[in-house]
Amino acid sequence: MATSEVVKITSKGQFTLPVEIRRDLSLGKDSYLYVTKVGHLIVMKKVDELSLDEISTILQSLAKERGITRSLLMKEVERARAKLLEEKYEKTQA
């Protein structure tokens, strides 16, 4: 059976998940939740339970919102690779 309770939002936008829900979902002190709005609903899911498809969809949406194109992303990947190779080369020379 679904657990439901009313929770209060604080002035800082915080609220407490009921203990029964935290226990049922194994949510502890350092757990992370992905939060999204679907229509008039707020949906939360444990980050470690997201599928690769869900992660891909989230990243694509964030990239689109921030104007990150595939070519820009590939340029950054190449820049990071070059930096790692340079650091590796410097270590082997030392």
Image (cartoon, rainbow, N blue to C red):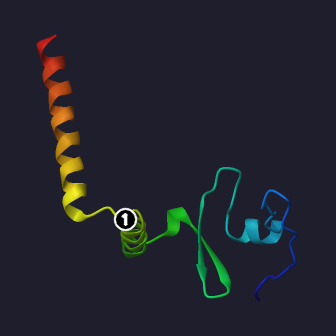
Q: Is residue 6 left or right of residue 42?
A: right
Above or below for 40 versus 76? below
In the rendered image, the quadrant that contains the N terminus is: bottom right
Q: Which residue is mark 1?
A: 63
Expressed as whole percent of the image width and height from the top left, the position of residue 36 reads 58, 74
Above or below for 41 versus 83? below
Residue at the image point whose x is 20% and y is 33% from the top: 83
Residue at the image point whose x is 39% and y is 74% from the top: 57
* 77, 50: nearer the viewer: 77
Residue at the image point whose x is 18% and y is 50% from the top: 75
Expressed as whole percent of the image width and height from the top left, the position of residue 88 reads 17, 26
* 48, 91: nearer the viewer: 91
Q: Is residue 88 left or right of residue 51?
A: left
Q: How many C-alpha atoms fall within 10 Å of the one at disc 1: few (<14), some, or many (≥20)?
A: some
Q: Amino acid at mark 1?
A: Ala
Question: In the picture, residue 89 is in which quadrant?
Answer: top left
Expressed as whole percent of the image width and height from the top left, the position of residue 44 reads 63, 73
Q: Is residue 53 left or right of residue 47?
A: left
Q: SS class of the residue under badge 1?
A: helix
Residue with the most extreme top position: 94
* 70, 28: nearer the viewer: 70
Residue with the most extreme front position: 67
Q: Is residue 54 left or right of residue 76?
A: right
Residue at the image point whose x is 74% and y is 66% from the top: 22
